[in-house]
Amino acid sequence: MKPLGPIPHGFETVNGQLAVAGQTAEMLVKRAGDTPLFVYSSAIIADRVDSLRKAMPERLRIHYAVKANPYPDILKVMAGLVDGFDIASAGELEQALAAGQRAACISFAGPGKRDRELRAAILAGVTLNCESEQEVRRALMIGEAENIAPRLAIRVNPDFELRGSGMKMGGGPKPFGLDAERVPALARDILAAGVEWRGLHIFTGSQALDAGAISETQGKVLSLASQLTEEIGVALPHLNMGGGFGIPYFRGDTPLDIGRIGNSLEDQFGKLPDNLAETEFSIELGRYLVGEAGVYLTRVIDRKVSHGMTYLITDGGLHHQLAASGNFGTVVRRNYPAAIASRFDSDAVEEVSIVGCLCTPLDRLADQAMLPRADVGDLVAIFCAGAYGATASPSAFLGQGPAREILV
Ligand SMILES: *Cc1c(COP(=O)(O)O)cnc(C)c1O
C-alpha cells in the first residue's frame, strides 16, 4: 500500500459523490459532455487570493503566472482578482489580453523571445523582462522601428536559490536571466537609450513549502535589488520578487504558512533601504493560486487483476495529467491525492492501482492506493489538477486528444 496525498479543502460531498459548487461529479460530466474532464472551482480560487491578500503586506502586488493554467475562464476570473499577469510567450500575451487584463499590468519573461513576440509585446505596452544583452538590443531596435519606447526590466540570475524548492531556477549557470554582476551595465544602457526603465525581476524557484526558506530568500532578493540599484544609480521603479509558494501534493506535505511569510515581509518592507523606498513590489504565483482549485475526473473503463494487483483502467491518463503520473520534474513517483468521485463518502476497502489508457507503463495515476471498491463506470478524481495539467501534458500522445475543461 502506498499513501495518497492530502485532498485539498473546498470540495464537497453531495449524494455520496464528490461535488464542486453543489454539483456532483456526474452532473459536471454531463454538463461538460464527457470525460476526461478538468473541473476548476472559482470559489476556491477566490478564497485563495483573498486569504493571500489578507496575509501579505498591502503594498505587495500579486501577479498570476499564466503558464500554470491559461484556461480562458480562469484567466477572466483571475483578471478581476489579481494585480497583474506574468506571461512567457506571445500566445500567452494574446490569452491575457483576451481575458481583459490591461497591458500595463502584464510582464513578459522567458528565454528565447522571438522578434515577432518582442514586437507584439512592445506594441501592446507590456513590460519585457529581458533575459540577455542581446534581447535588450533587439527590443530597442524594434522600439525604434515602431517609434514606441519599450518598457524594459531585466531578469536577474541571482547567485542564490530558494531552499527546498521543487524546481531550481537560480544559482550558478542558468539559461534564465542575466548574471547579477552584468545587470548594472545593461540597466545603464537601457536608461541611456531613453526608454522606460521598469526595474528588476528575480525569480529563485518553485514549489517551496517552507515559509522560513521563502522569507529568507525574499530578504536576499531585496538586498540584491538594493545593491544592483546602488550600482545602476537611479531609484528602482519595480521589483518582481519571484514567487515559489508551493502546495501540498503528497502525504506528509504541509500547507505553506503564509501568515509567517506576510509578517516577515511586512518587517522587511518596514526597513527598506532608501533606494527601494518608492519601489513597487510584486510576487508572481502560479500553482499556489490555482493548483488546489482543480480536479481531474476520468471514468473507469476496465477493471482487471494481474498477479494479484487490481487495476482500474480509466479513459484519462498522463496525456492530461503528466504531473500526477510522476513524469513532470519529479525524481521519485508518489501518489497525488485521489478518490473514487462517484463513491466519495465510501470507506477505503481495497488496494488498487489506477492507470490511464495509454500503452506505456509510465501512465499511472495512483499506485497501490487504498480506495473504496470501484467498478467499470465509476468516476475517479485526481486532485491538485488546477495547475500544470491540461496544457503541461502531451495531449497529442497516442491520439487521445485533449480533455474537456469547465470552471464552476
Ligand atoms: C513557472 C514560473 C512561475 C510560476 O511558478 P509556480 O510554481 O506555478 O508558482 C513564476 N515565475 C516564473 C518566472 C516562472 O518561470
Image: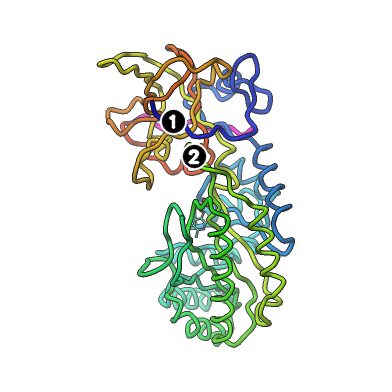
Does 226 sit above or below residue 372?
Answer: below
Residue 379 position in % (x across, y down): 49, 19
Q: Secondary structure at mark 2?
A: loop
Label 1 Cα crowd, 10 Å radius (few <14 / some 14-19 / many 20+): some
Q: CA distance from mark 2 to mark 1?
A: 9 Å
Mark 2 or mark 1, earlier in chain: 1
Question: Residue 327: percent from the left, percent from the top?
Answer: 35, 41
Three-letter amino acid code of the residue under disc 1: Pro
Determine if the C-beta at disc 2 is less than 8 A from ligand 1: no
In the image, 374 versus 87, the foreground residue is 374
**Location of residue 314 with respect to 317 vertically, above or below:** above
196, 247: nearer the viewer:
247
**Between residues 107 and 306, which one lies in front from this camera angle?**
306
Query: Which residue is pictured at 53% across the width and 56% down the height?
Result: 244
Q: Is residue 50 visible?
A: yes
Q: What residue is pinned by disc 1? A: 3
> Horizontally, is 15 left or right of 182 in the view?
right
Q: Which percent across, then down, holds residue 260?
A: 65, 56
User: If the image is split into quadrants, where does the N terminus sit?
Assistant: top left
The residue that appears at 39% across and 38% down in the rendered structure is 322
Q: What SS does tag 1 mark?
A: loop
The magenta region covers: 399-408
For label 2, count other residues whose C-alpha is less than 10 Å away and answer few (under 14), some (14-19) or many (20+).
few
Q: Which mark is residue 252?
A: 2
Tell me if label 2 and label 1 are in contact, CB under 8 Å: yes
